[in-house]
Image: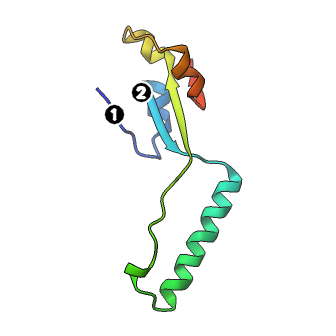
Amino acid sequence: MATRYPEASEDRSEASGLIRERQAAAPARNAAQYRRAAAYTDKNLKDAKSSDLPVEHSREFDFIINVETAKVRGLTISQHVLLQATEVIG
């Protein structure tokens, strides 16, 4: 069964979760995200209509696989999938 954990619960994916994706957390990316948030705030303070503002979403994600959990569940994760992961636990 697939389970999605909230961003703040990283310890769950390390403890028992099988696969997890999260927004990439590179420092340079965070700086760019803060600049975009400031620009949005500026537009809102200048009375911009919400319908005029574009929708922002993440484009980069971390893909984390817990192979210890896979072994416990009797699953085999293919090498192809493991090579795509940004982090492999266990």
Q: Position of residue 8 (x, y in %)?
A: 47, 46
Which residue corresponds to mark 1? 3
The image quarter containing residue 6 is: top left
10 Å crowding of disc 2: few (<14), some (14-19), many (20+) = many
The image quarter containing residue 72 is: top left
For residue 81, side relative to residue 6 (left or right): right
Work out which quarter of the rendered image holds the N terminus and state it.
Answer: top left
Name the foreground residue: 39 vs 59.
Answer: 59
Label 1 or label 2, whichever comes before in sequence order: 1
Q: Residue at x 39, y 40 (%)?
A: 5
Report helix, strand or loop for mark 2. Answer: loop
10 Å crowding of disc 1: few (<14), some (14-19), many (20+) = few
Q: Residue at x 50, y 88 (%)?
A: 45
Which residue corresponds to mark 2? 17
Please tell me the numbered disc located at residue 89.
none
For residue 21, side relative to residue 5 (left or right): right
**In the displayed structure, would residue 62 be above or below residue 51?**
above
Q: Position of residue 74 (x, y in %)?
A: 38, 8
**In the displayed structure, would residue 37 be above or below residue 84?**
below
| Circle 1/circle 2 CB separation < 8 Å | yes
Taking the view exactly as shown, the residue that stands out farthest to the bottom is: 46
State how far apart marks 1 and 2 are (Cα).
8 Å
Residue type at mark 2: give it.
Gly
Name the foreground residue: 16 vs 43.
Answer: 43
Residue type at mark 1: give it.
Thr
Report helix, strand or loop for mark 1. Answer: loop
Taking the view exactly as shown, the residue that stands out farthest to the left is: 1
Q: Position of residue 56 (x, y in %)?
A: 48, 64
